[in-house]
Image (spheres, grey):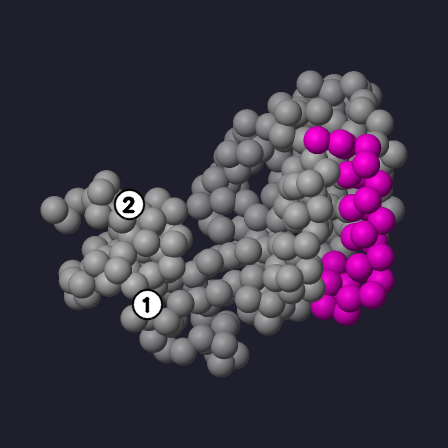
Amino acid sequence: MNIIEKKLFETQAMKVANPERPFWYTSGKLGPYFINTHFLYGNETFACELLEKITNLVDKPADLIKAISEDVWKFYQTNELYREVMDEFAAMLNANETFKSCDVITGGERRDWFFSIAAARLTGKKHYFIFKDLAIYDENGVKIESLNGMKVAHIADLITEASSYDRAWIPAIEAAGAKMIFTASIVDRNQGGRKLLESKNVEMFAPVSIAHEFFNCAKEEGILSEEQFKMVYDFTEDPDAYGIAFLKSHPNYIQDSIENGDKSTKSKAQRCLDTDPYHLK
């Protein structure tokens, strides 16, 4: 396993469930793991503090950019775990010829900034901030209208289906007269994002790919038990079949979650009961 893969488990950015107690997802379905990539920012506490600052300042772009740019770089210099992650990530970027040909780095609101700011500093490229309203700001907090035909590398925390690229990041960059030719995310969830990006002629790179090989390495490292590995394997093969099989073998799990779970668990389990996503009724 590479450094970033190991740190995902160390910080619980990657959290795998007890096979008898899988997680409820927002959709009302069951799954064996959660990924909070931004926990690589030292740990969950540090990550949540930065996220709260971003949330509080997001309506004041100039103030936000100044504050978090300073915070992230200072944190990189003082937090060993985050520094190891970003040094590894930057080295991988610098070894990629397409990335090296890019003129600038962009990062999108909000969690991309946990990694794009430091990646820009470490690779010597200028950084531009893209907000959800598609406005683009430079490192001084100045809103810009044109990127003057630049080739762009977009740095993200996580790619699933790449819907945010299709909806926001690529259109914003193209509206500014530039072209995204490369993107790197810390984690690729292998849920179709790569295919979409390739259709847009964007090369994609991720040091962590959520696939059988990743979980097998975690098992060999002693991070996952045989039971956890089997659970994850079954889920990645067919998420719905996994959920159906689990609920059939644990017929009281929904009701138990509703009666004894925390507020979030109750809500998600109730959604499963109400919407019947597995068609079990």
Nearer the observer, 157 or 207: 157
Q: Residue at x 54, y 51 (%)?
A: 188
Please give left or right for residue 113 compared with residue 194 in the image.
Answer: right
Q: Residue drawn 45% across and 71% down?
A: 216
Q: Secondary structure at mark 1?
A: loop
Q: Residue furthest left?
A: 281
Name the amino acid type tagged 2.
Answer: Arg
Q: Please tell me which residue lies in front, 72 or 214.
A: 72
Q: What range is drawn magenta here?
A: 59-88
Q: Earlier in the sequence, mark 2 or mark 1?
A: 1
- Residue at the (85%, 62%) spot, across then down: 77
Crowd tier of the residue under label 2, counting other residues whose Cα lies within 10 Å: few below 14, some 14–19, many 20 or above: many
Q: Give the residue number, with chain letter if any, for mark 2.
A: 271
The amino acid pointed to by label 1 is: Arg
Q: Main secondary structure of the magenta part?
A: helix
Please check the rendered image and state whether residue 141 is part of the magenta-colored stretch, yes or no. no
Measure how far apart labels 2 and 1 are at the Cα level.
17 Å
Decide: is 274 above or below 34: above
Residue 21, disc? 1
- x and y percent of residue 55 in the render? 66, 41
Residue at 38% across, 54% down: 263
Task: Point out residue 157 in the picture as x, y percentages from the top left corner.
Answer: 62, 49
- Looking at the rendering, which quadrant does residue 169 occupy? top right
